[in-house]
Image (cartoon, helix red, strand yellow):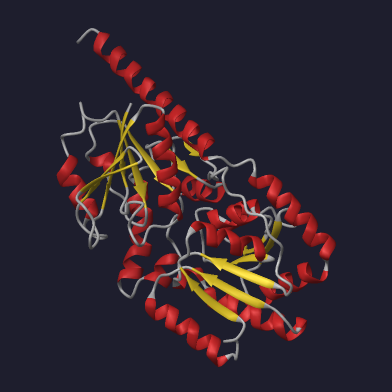
Amino acid sequence: MRILILNWRCPRNPKAGGAEIVTFEIARRLVADSHFVEWFASSFPGAEATEDMDGVRIVRAGRQWTVHWAAFRHYRGRLRGRFDVVIDQVNTIPFFTPLWADVPSFMFIHQLAREVWWYESRFPVNAIGYLLEPLFLRLYRRTPAFTESHSTQQDLLRLGFSAAITIVPPGLESAVTFSGAKCDIPTFLYVGRIAPSKRIEHILLAFEQFRVSAGTGQLWLVGTGNPSYRRALQALVDRKGLSSVVRFWGKLPTLEKHRLMTEAHLLLMASVREGWGLVVTEANALGTPAIVYDVPGLRDAVRNRETGLVVHPSPEKLAEAMLELWRDPAMYQLVGKRAQQWSRTFSFDDAAKIIFERIVHVTEGVHQRMEVHATRPHQ
């Protein structure tokens, strides 16, 4: 099968995140199964116009806010005969393939933006985006969709989606292993983009409250992102007198990231929403449970009081949960063990299989309807 993926970023884009990781792992598995996959994405400084990544053909044109128009110009009217299906990956702004693709179209959406608009964009762009997003997505109501979580599935159903919405649980590389001991003092970890919608300042404030009660602890922040937000976080750390116990690691190689995940006691996530929160499952695989906010995506990635804790979104509640698990070693060991066991049920192989089987089911149905239509006597 010949599959076209439209995504505003490719795996090599400096701003690529969890959505791109998941998509690429699925794409390269489809290629390994002898399918052809082309991925169209925006360009970035130093990027080649075309590139092969593990057999996935990467094509780049346009920038973040023009890639959708670039895709339309590049492919409109030229899909049939070249591709069997197109996967329209929606990250804030869709590619509107239901309006122009001449082959079966699927939507792949990890999360709705909704509240993220207020954190990541300035007025009036944030207000316009917030108001228009439901209108954009309603164009896809009859388009088969893939998503990672039940939270996003419910969001789409509330928008009136009538086509099938297939849950594709995130995968996890079986090679995620690291042996090591936990740190001697309570150690907390954040991994992800340094961006306002991640509400890392909540994690800092919760950590401050934890230290006041426990008298010890350290916090590691891993990732890169918005420079002005990074400076604001550093200013908060300095103001709270936490410079000696809070470390900004920046972006790390996978092995080093896994080492920190192994040595930390807890992963903390305070985002306004996520598609899932792949780092939660990744940390779980290394024996580290998570405390997360009760928001879409994160509430799917953690089973409350079974594989971690899900708390009301506030630094106070986050700090209370940190203290609870630190003061109750038996409970901590239990949720850590269950989190690791649950992480073993996630596989990129399974994710690729679910997507491909759904594509086959839908395209076979389309072909059958076309054959029936062609054999009907004309009036």
| Front one among 51 and 6 | 51
| Front one among 88 and 5 | 5
Q: Position of residue 207 (x, y in %)?
A: 65, 78
State the image quarter where residue 286 is shown: bottom right
On the rendered structure, is 140 left or right of 251? left
Give the residue displayed 69% in from the left and 82% down from the top: 209
Is 189 located above or below residue 160 in the figure?
Answer: below
Q: Position of residue 118 (x, y in %)?
A: 41, 71
Looking at the image, can residue 270 be seen? no
Q: Position of residue 92 (x, y in %)?
A: 36, 57
On the rendered structure, is 325 left or right of 187? right
| Front one among 95 and 49 | 49
Looking at the image, can residue 1 be seen? yes
Is 308 located above or below residue 350 in the figure?
Answer: below
State the image quarter where residue 114 is shown: bottom left
Is 320 located above or below residue 140 in the figure?
Answer: below
The C terminus: image quadrant? top left
Give the residue displayed 51% in from the left and 46% down from the top: 148
